[in-house]
Amino acid sequence: MELPYYPINDFGPVMKGLVIGGLGIFHVFLAQFAIGGGMLMCYFQWLAAERRHALARQFVSSYFQYLVLFSFVLGALTGVAMWFTTIQLSPRTIGLMVDQFHWIWATEWTFFVVEVVSGYAFYRYSAQLDDRSRMRLLQFYTVAAWGSLFWINGILSWQLTPGTWSIEQPQLWGGFFNASFWPSLLFRTVSSMATAALVACVVINTMPNASRDQRKELINKTANFMIPMVLMPLLGAWYLAVFPDDSRSWVLGGSPAMSLFMGITIGASLLIGCYALIGLFFQKLYINGATATLLCALAFGATAGAEFVREGVRKPYTIRNTLLSNSITPQEVAHLRQIGSVTNDPYPLRGAEQLPTEQLRLGARVYRFQCSICHTPSGVNGLTHLTGSWNGEQKRLMIAQLQMTKPFMPPFAGNAEELEALVQYLEWLSADRPPQWPTRHDPQILQQINEWLIEAGTATAVDKAAGRGPAE
């Protein structure tokens, strides 16, 4: 069994997953703005063509300038940044996704190209076109933008619910149209419509030639686009229902962090929905730019919470039943228990000269390979903080039986010597990195670690509970 190793970048005290997550949240929010924005502009272009509002055409032109500036420019930059960071930090996951869905990716990129070309064509020539041509161009843009969501949604939802796909039998469409495909797609569509409408309320307040009454009327028109938010509780419940049992348990109390972010998503969405339904749709209220911006901030918070949950519920996997969160497959864990996880790692250790012993250098390499994607040594989600109250024996036991003590963690994929080296590395860090440190090779301790590793097994807690997993 030949395990691939990749060079992985380091961001110091910032957790690598936080870098990907932060970029991802910002990119998703911009993408939702672009998708819903196309639908909203088609609606307002229809209002303009039917002469239902005098400023509808002006609004479309004004709104599209913001869409180009934020969604096209910043969206493109963050999209490239996402690819740039993910191939540095999680190359095996991205490689498997591209390998299995390369034609789907190509189709999605084709839709994206149509979206960009039609969008810039509208931006450049809309003032010279009649209403019918403007509508047709906006429809091209809208279909392409939503089509891009359609294709990417299948790949992202596959990571959590791979359907009939498996690495042994990679059924493309069985994996693409998986259990969470439709609830995720519909939920994101409604979120995109709401995001676009909230941004519209901000844009309307920037229109210099519109009176307060005209702005109020335009805002009330955008409220129609937020009505589908009443479906979000049903779509959210449907989405939650198709989660694997263990993933559902994380958000229902099994993981305080995921439960908290789920609460943020629900709370922010509820506040926006109630304000839109009662205040804007029924009472026909006017909101100024500050209030509209605040609502957009709430929408961003809801998006952030939802994306955190979507990423978190996959643990201990990045691709369900196929690739663990540290980019090791379940089948490779038992093999690495025998030969060591970093025995064949070809990459040099950065700052190795600062580590006083070979055992500490081994521990640092084990940390880099198995832990660094989700943890830092002493920064965000730092191991020295998380293990600071444990003594040496507790560290050995907790790490050896990691998947049992922390079910959302993958099993330790190394031998007893590597585990002891990792423990010594953590204790050296906690001692403020002294220039001298003893090497510890106590045979009794190594034997005890090995017994704990055998007792824990190589399957994840999730797979053990389901009665499946690699052979021990």
Image: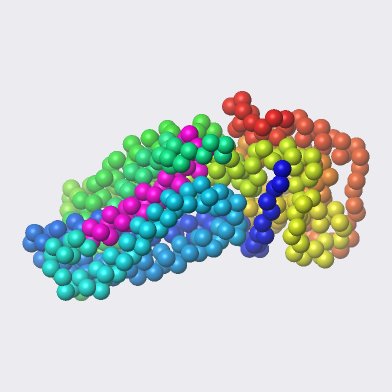
Task: Please tell me which residue is depicted at 39% across the width and 45% down the height of the picture.
Answer: 267
Outermost residue toward the left in this view: 51
Q: Nearer the viewer, residue 471 or 53?
A: 471
For residue 78, above or below residue 414: below
Quadrant in which the N terminus is drawn: top right
Instruction: Quadrant for residue 238, please give it.
Output: top left
User: Is 339 situated left or right of 67 in this image?
Assistant: right
Quadrant for the C terminus, please.
top right
- In reply to whether residue 158 is colored magenta, the answer given is yes
Name the foreground residue: 216 vs 25. Answer: 25
Which portion, as a residue range, is magenta?
138-166
State left or right for residue 32 relative to residue 129.
right
Residue 417 in picture, x, y percent from top left: 84, 45
Q: Is residue 129 left or right of residue 165?
A: left
What is the count of numbered marks?
Answer: 0
Name the residue nearer the viewer: 440 or 257.
440
Whether residue 42 is situated above or below residue 313 in the rendered picture: below
- Choose between 244 and 427: the one closer to the eye: 244
The percent position of residue 442, horizontal first and vertical second, equals 91, 42
Task: State whether residue 122 appears in this view.
Answer: yes
Residue 298 visible at all:
no
User: x, y (%) of residue 369?
Assistant: 70, 52
Majority secondary structure in the magenta region: helix
Q: Is residue 160 magenta?
A: yes
